[in-house]
Amino acid sequence: MEPRNYAVDETLRDGTHLHIRAIRADDKQALVALFERLSPETVYFRFHGVKKSLSRGELVYLTELDFHRQAALVAVLKMDGVGRIVGVGRYAAAPEAPEHRAEVAVTVEDAHQGRGIGSLLLKHLMNVARAEGVTELDAHVLAENKRMLQLFERTGLVFSRSAYAGACHLVMTTTASPKAFPPQRPSERPREPG
């Protein structure tokens, strides 16, 4: 499946249906809505500082990707019959970075944290990365962001750790099978967008 067409259905631990798909250029407004629902703490953890809004340039950067050096997946839950983006996982390689390495970030709306959405986003993002030849993912996480550190550590794929100025730098491989991700269920079938 082409990374820009990536789409799978998953079932959360509580039985709720979750759709994970590649981000699209027309997701800009949905991304703004997600950002506005995030708590100041979640925004601070994601952007490593205070941020009040997403600029037009940032929205272009976050949604118009090549799906090789940059890729992003969104987690969509049905709420009142309408799909709503509740999480985003992305990787991006800096221009000077080697082809096999990119930085990774995962954000989940506060009301849906702790449900396994972040783990599923990371699992599927690693699938995309691996298919595109990205074998190492760097994560820069603030030291106080215990949930995100645990998410990455639970994969069993972290092979390098260091600390700097109140943050942690973790490097994960995408070439091994993660421990934290459950085996696929029958309801988790890749599907073409339709």
Image (cartoon, rainbow, N blue to C red):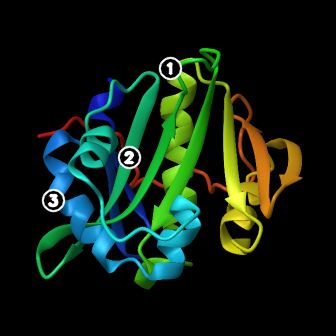
Which of pointers 3 and 1 lies earlier in the amino acid sequence?
Answer: 3
Residue count near mark 3 (Cα–Cα under 10 Å), binned few <14, some 14–19, many ≥20: few
Front residue (pair 68, 46): 46
Residue sitting at x 18%, y 40%: 25
- Foreground mark, 2 or 3, reads 3
Q: Note whether 115 is above or below 172 in the view shown.
A: below
Q: Note whether 18 is above or below 94 in the view shown.
A: below
Q: Is residue 149 visible?
A: yes
Q: Is residue 184 visible?
A: no
Residue count near mark 1 (Cα–Cα under 10 Å), binned few <14, some 14–19, many ≥20: some
Residue sitting at x 21%, y 49%: 56
The residue where tag 3 is placed is 29
**Residue type (three-letter) at the residue carrying disc 2:** Leu
The answer to whether 57 appears left or right of 110 in the picture is left
The answer to whether 92 appears left or right of 17 in the picture is right
Q: Count all numbered tags in the image, as a single digit.
A: 3
Q: Position of residue 63 (x, y in %)?
A: 27, 42
The residue where tag 2 is placed is 73
Which of pointers 2 and 3 lies earlier in the amino acid sequence?
Answer: 3
**Residue type (three-letter) at the residue carrying disc 3:** Gln
Q: CA distance from mark 2 to mark 1?
A: 14 Å
Q: CA distance from mark 2 to mark 3?
A: 16 Å
Check if mark 3's residue and mark 1's residue have beta carbons within 8 Å. no
Q: Quadrant of residue 98?
A: top right
Front residue (pair 35, 192): 35
Looking at the rendered structure, the secondary structure element under dot 1 is loop
Residue sitting at x 32%, y 39%: 61
Residue 132, label in figure: 1
Front residue (pair 101, 36): 36
Residue 54, label in figure: none
**Residue type (three-letter) at the residue carrying disc 1:** Glu
Q: Position of residue 183 (x, y in %)?
A: 60, 51
